[in-house]
DNA sequence: TATTGTTATACTCTATAACTATA
DNA sequence: TATAGTTATAGAGTATAACAATA
């Protein structure tokens, strides 16, 4: 159960990517016929499609947030889990997994990890002994506060890129996409 | 190596999600104290953060495109691979994996699958026998055409949601995010 | 019978490192 | 030595199905 072992993804910046051979440290042999050095890659119609660019942008932001989370020693996914528990104290595992859009069985090892590390407390409900109430411990709140700070820095970075004037509008479109697709 | 076995993700629609117990088929017992039925889940600050909403929107569109791809019998990831090979005939595996932002070792089984199914042809380069040139076969082009049609329908759906007037601008922001984050 | 949470299991996607063959 | 591609292996994240306890 490694805690800071996240994937490193190289994002695809845009219309073309220049792929270089070699270590780029200096005077290698000059490119010759058939050589792949410095050949720009054509993404064709992908470049102008929302679906593709949404994926690339999401991968880039996810990776950036992963770095920040790793500095705290958490996986990025813990952030939404901790936040939802914090905002809904006493929430059950089934409710939490549904809110997160994941099966309850996927949540079991996550909660187990958070309990083991003293972030989350589980208490059986009195009136339904099948169900557990989840709450954050003091340590969980502290970790969440750290992650929230990191997320705020991340978000400020995004604000700078998007521009505050357009952010609200951009967010609205993202929500519409999530709600109305298919 | 299953070809149409994709994940089904339930996306998180927005600020709150109403989590219901039971099969929702009618008159269950009324909610009582501590009951989780119809309790809205508070997402707190997640709801207004770009990073989170980007993730949710991307998961939703990815799932939608997965459905369309599954109807053709392909995984969604094959689409960008086929497109890039089509637009860059003779590209090497290393170039392709770099363009896709993945390690070359991740590409090996993908290319193996595409070659096995007669979509892609590999030829050794004359002047560097370590390298393979990748090209699409007729079957590969046909599959790509099918996927492109599916992608166009998907894209029209997104256009409808975003609105054609704002699409260009939305795309530009996505590209900026991918290029400038962190 | 239905629901909560766990377990067993499997599958996708990805990476790192060691390897081969070539350069 | 360095690079192209493969293999072996591992890990995160997810799902489905069967299960025990409880309702």
Image: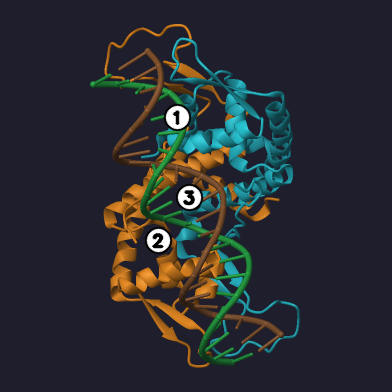
Chain colours: A cyan, B orange, C green, D brown
The kind of secondary structure element at disc 3 is: helix
In percent of width and height, residue B32 lies at: 43, 6
- Gap in angstroms between the C-alphas marked 3 and 2: 14 Å
Query: Which mark is on residue A83?
Result: none
Asked if marks 3 and 1 touch (Cβ < 8 Å), the reply is no
The kind of secondary structure element at disc 2 is: helix
Q: Residues within 10 Å of mark 1 (few under 14, many from 20)?
A: many
Using the rendered image of the protein, determine whether residue A102 is visible from the camera's viewpoint: no
In percent of width and height, residue C8 lies at: 39, 44
- Gap in angstroms between the C-alphas marked 3 and 1: 27 Å
Residue B120's place in the image compared with B77, above or below, is below
Answer with mark 3 or mark 1, whichever residue precedes in sequence.
Answer: 3
Query: Hey, which quadrant is residue B10 in on the image?
Result: top left
Instruction: Please state the total of marks drawn on the protein image.
Output: 3
Q: Nearer the viewer, mark 3 or mark 1?
A: 1
Residue at point 74%, 34% (across, down):
A146
Residue on which disc 1 sits: A98
Query: Hey, which quadrant is residue B140 in on the image?
Result: bottom left
Q: Nearer the viewer, mark 1 or mark 2?
A: 1
């Amino acid at each position: 159960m490694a805690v800071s072992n996240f994937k490193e993804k190289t994002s695809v910046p845009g219309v073309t990517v220049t792929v270089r051979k070699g270590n780029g440290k200096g005077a290698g042999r000059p490119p010759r016929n058939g050589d792949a050095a410095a050949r720009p890659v054509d993404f064709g119609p992908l470049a102008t499609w929302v679906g593709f660019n949404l994926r690339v942008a999401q991968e880039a932001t996810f990776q950036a947030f992963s770095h920040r989370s790793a500095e705290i020693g958490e996986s990025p996914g813990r952030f939404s889990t901790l936040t939802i528990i914090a905002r809904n104290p006493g929430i059950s595992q089934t409710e939490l997994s549904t809110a997160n859009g994941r099966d309850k069985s996927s949540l079991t090892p996550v909660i187990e990890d958070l309990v083991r590390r003293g972030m989350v407390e589980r208490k059986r409900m009195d009136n339904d002994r099948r169900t557990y109430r989840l709450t954050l411990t003091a340590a969980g709140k502290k970790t969440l506060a750290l992650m929230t700070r990191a997320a705020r820095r991340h978000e400020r970075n995004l604000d700078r890129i998007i521009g505050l004037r357009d952010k609200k509008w951009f967010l609205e479109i993202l929500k519409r996409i999530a709600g109305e697709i298919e």
